[in-house]
Image (cartoon, rainbow, N blue to C red):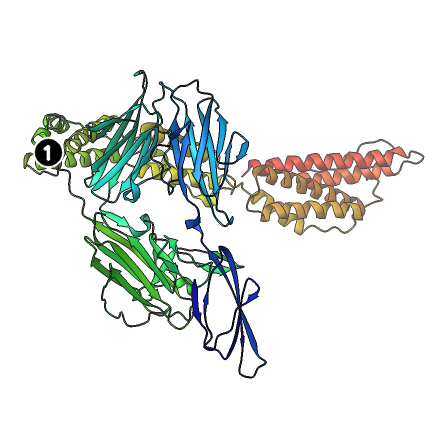
């Protein structure tokens, strides 16, 4: 039955398409049908024209109409059956059992399924496969609006099975990974000092033994319930499962940390009571902000809150939500003392219109803080609150969005509890032995640290200081010192001593090579090879300064530097090339043909390019010199022919006669020019001999080239 009152002038209501009788005061009592009820409310305004329609879908939960009173297997009631528990294990008596008969007592319609077979009705025979068979039972209400599902695991006995099936500690303990019978080592956290653990073996006759911190606490067949007490720091729980035949065993090791701090995001909030915003995409986020909606996708980000100085602080842990939000955490029984958090408008909103009032509750008690009546805006600096929650049952975080609910992104940064876990007590049987530690410290006094690498010396000194501190505390009766701490301290000291053989390398040769390298003027060298040299020098200097560098590293660094030095190349001497260029620039090309002039100008341009290039190699300079000298000689010879083309000699000789012109006192070039003139004149008077002028010109060119090379060599030898 649902009652509602509508404050309008003319109201018409339908249920599942059927009009309900109108009332004078517009109040209705509506009987809900089992399943879905579609309600439509038509409201007409005073003008008789304007109308609004409101639609409501109401699901009438008919759970009370399903009654499953029991399930039987082979005529025997399923052990521990509870209609609200939906998963069971049935242990077959023998391994050769091949089928079972399932009977379900209920007031609904039943479907039984297993091994791909489906049977409608309250009774079914199910064939069993090897080892385990899962049977599904579905009970439908008479109106079809609700279905209850049950799963029964039928397990045949295996006297060699020593596996743990399940570990349960409720909300007070969490594992870092999901438990699996195939995995044997786990870590996790505990949130209470006293926790009831339930350990269940896969086999009904397998025996479970539980040890905590090395001491056995209890044992039982198949299922063991045991209260375990936890102290601050590391707590080790070992669960050993022994098979029925006594031949097999498995040990599962759980290392639980009882932390000094429990973050709020380590706990699950109460989903039934909590609320977050008026939009479906608004979700309570762990260690993230509620997120902005971009392209219809909400993307949570890091939690960011504004500080007093205007800077933004980012938090790795915390809770994000959208106001109005109301978040509840069940903390009854937990080892918590004080709750602390920063809170405010998350800065992901940018320049919005945020306005939120925050409230904090311990059970029903609201916790006061400065400015709690004021709304916080996006430019309001974050606040911090801290209050005791010891012995409280519930923590509530409330954020009221006020008149509008946009940009009201609220975040709780570094939200955490301090804990009440006690230190592990020392018992008389736990007398601390320091004999090994004392002997290790005596050995450390004679340890030779000379020449050891710096990092090893530091590790050794730190380990020695830590060991001396532990020994002093143990001898003074400090109850917080455990045998594990003593043993760890001498073990670390001995390990550090073992590394003292790591000696620094002899850096004498390295220093010599570095000094030589730093004396070089890199401006005298070509670019090629300079970067490799600079890198090698930097590496060598780093090794020289490194107190941890050993001999192999030292030797390799100076060798690499020396090799880089050997691959540097000096810039070549260009004085001879400069002289040739100057000479060529003063040379007249008058009388030479165009081809000769072009060759000369190309040679001169190439020589000037090499001269101007700071990175020209010695080979390039030599080539340029030779090319320009040859071009000069050829041009000189050509220009000489053009000046006296008809000269046939002063002695009247003709034909192949030789010139006896006096060339004494002339330089090589002038003598060569005179000889060339005479020879050319003699050969040019021949008639009827077409080969002679060509051969004569070839000879002149060869002589000019030879003279140029000789002159070039003499010029280089004199420098």
For the image shown, how many numbered marks are present on the structure?
Answer: 1
Task: Say whether residue 517 is left or right of residue 363.
Answer: right
Q: Pointer 1: what residue?
A: 471
Residue at image coords 41%, 50%: 64
Q: Pick the quarter of the image with the N terminus.
A: bottom left
Farthest residue, direction bottom: 47
Q: Residues within 10 Å of mark 1 (few under 14, many from 20)?
A: many
Q: Position of residue 615 (x, y in %)?
A: 55, 44
Task: Say whether residue 84 is left or right of residue 620.
Answer: left
Farthest residue, direction right: 688
Q: Secondary structure at mark 1?
A: helix
Q: In this view of the protein, which residue sits in the foreground, 31 or 552?
A: 31
Task: Say whether residue 154 is left or right of residue 656.
Answer: left
- Up-down: is 52 above or below 584? below
Q: Position of residue 214 (x, y in %)?
A: 20, 28
In which quadrant of the rendered view does residue 339 lie?
Answer: bottom left
In this view of the protein, can residue 299 be seen by the observer? yes
In this view of the protein, can residue 654 be seen by the observer? no
- Up-down: is 92 above or below 348? above
Residue at image coords 45%, 77%: 25
Q: In this view of the protein, which residue sits in the foreground, 111 or 347?
A: 111
Residue at image coords 44%, 26%: 132
Q: Position of residue 602 (x, y in %)?
A: 71, 46
Q: Position of residue 511 (x, y in %)?
A: 32, 35
Q: Pick the quarter of the image with the C terminus.
A: top right
Task: Say whether residue 189 is left or right of residue 94.
Answer: left
Q: In this view of the protein, which residue sits in the foreground, 112 or 465?
A: 112
């Amino acid at each position: 039955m649902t009652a509602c009152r509508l404050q309008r002038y003319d109201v018409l209501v339908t249920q599942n398409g059927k009009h309900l009788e109108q009332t004078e005061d517009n109040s209705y009592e509506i009987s809900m049908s089992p399943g879905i009820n579609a309600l439509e409310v038509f409201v007409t305004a005073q003008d008789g024209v304007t109308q609004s329609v409101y639609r409501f879908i109401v699901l009438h939960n008919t759970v009370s109409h399903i009654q499953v009173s029991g399930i039987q297997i082979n005529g025997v009631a399923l052990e521990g059956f509870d209609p609200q528990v939906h998963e069971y294990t049935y242990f077959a008596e023998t391994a050769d059992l091949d089928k079972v008969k399932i009977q379900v007592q209920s007031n609904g319609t039943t479907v039984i399924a297993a091994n791909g077979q489906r049977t409608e009705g309250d009774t079914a025979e199910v064939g069993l496969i090897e080892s385990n068979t899962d049977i599904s039972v579905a009970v439908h209400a008479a109106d079809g609006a609700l279905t209850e599902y049950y799963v029964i695991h039928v397990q045949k006995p295996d006297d060699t099975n020593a596996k743990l099936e399940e570990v349960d500690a409720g909300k007070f303990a969490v594992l870092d990974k999901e438990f699996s019978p195939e995995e044997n080592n786990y870590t996790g956290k505990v949130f209470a000092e006293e926790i009831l653990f339930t350990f269940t073996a896969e086999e009904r006759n397998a025996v479970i033994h539980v040890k905590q911190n090395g001491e056995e606490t209890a044992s039982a067949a198949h299922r063991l319930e045991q209260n375990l007490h936890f102290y601050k720091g590391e707590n080790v729980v070992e669960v050993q499962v022994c098979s029925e035949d006594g031949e097999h065993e498995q040990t599962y090791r759980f290392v639980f940390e009882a932390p000094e701090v429990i973050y709020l995001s380590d706990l699950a909030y109460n989903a039934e009571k909590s609320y977050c915003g008026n939009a479906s995409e608004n979700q309570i986020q762990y260690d993230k902000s509620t997120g902005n909606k971009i392209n219809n996708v909400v993307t949570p980000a890091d939690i960011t809150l504004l500080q007093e100085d205007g800077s933004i602080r980012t938090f790795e842990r915390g809770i994000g939500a959208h106001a109005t939000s109301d978040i509840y955490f069940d903390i009854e029984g937990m080892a918590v003392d004080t709750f602390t958090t920063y809170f405010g408008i998350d800065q992901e909103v940018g320049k919005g219109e945020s306005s939120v009032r925050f409230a904090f509750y311990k059970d029903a008690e609201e916790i006061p803080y400065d400015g709690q009546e004021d709304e916080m805006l996006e430019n309001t600096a974050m606040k911090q609150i801290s209050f005791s929650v010891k012995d409280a049952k519930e923590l509530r975080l409330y954020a009221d969005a006020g008149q509008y609910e946009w940009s009201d992104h609220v975040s709780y940064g570094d939200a955490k509890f301090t804990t009440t876990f006690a230190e592990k007590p020392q018992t008389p049987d736990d007398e601390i032995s320091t004999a090994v530690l004392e002997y290790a410290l005596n050995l450390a006094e004679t340890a030779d640290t000379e020449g050891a690498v710096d990092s090893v010396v530091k590790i050794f000194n730190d380990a020695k200081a830590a060991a001396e501190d532990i020994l002093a505390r143990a001898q003074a009766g400090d109850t917080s010192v455990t045998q594990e701490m003593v043993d760890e301290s001498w073990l670390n000291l001995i390990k550090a001593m073992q590394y003292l053989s790591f000696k620094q390398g002899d850096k004498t040769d390295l220093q010599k090579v570095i000094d030589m390298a730093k004396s070089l003027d890199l401006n005298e060298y070509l670019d090629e090879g300079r970067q490799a040299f600079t890198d090698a020098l930097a590496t060598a200097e780093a090794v020289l300064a490194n107190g941890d560098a050993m001999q192999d590293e030292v030797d390799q660094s100076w060798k690499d530097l020396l090799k880089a030095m050997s691959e540097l190349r000096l810039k070549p001497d260009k004085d001879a090339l400069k002289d040739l260029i100057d000479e060529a620039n003063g040379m007249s090309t008058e009388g030479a043909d165009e081809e000769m002039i072009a060759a000369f100008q190309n040679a001169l341009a190439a020589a000037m390019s090499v001269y101007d290039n700071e990175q020209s190699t010695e080979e390039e300079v030599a080539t340029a010199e030779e090319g320009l000298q040859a071009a000069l000689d050829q041009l000189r010879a050509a220009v000489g022919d053009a000046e006296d083309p008809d000269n046939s000699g002063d002695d009247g000789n003709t034909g192949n006669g030789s010139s006896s012109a006096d060339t004494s006192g002339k330089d090589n070039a002038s003598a060569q020019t005179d000889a060339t003139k005479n020879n050319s004149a003699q050969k040019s008077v021949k008639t009827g001999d077409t080969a002679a002028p060509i051969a004569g010109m070839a000879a002149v060119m060869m002589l000019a080239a030879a003279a140029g090379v000789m002159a070039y060599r003499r010029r280089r030898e004199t420098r």
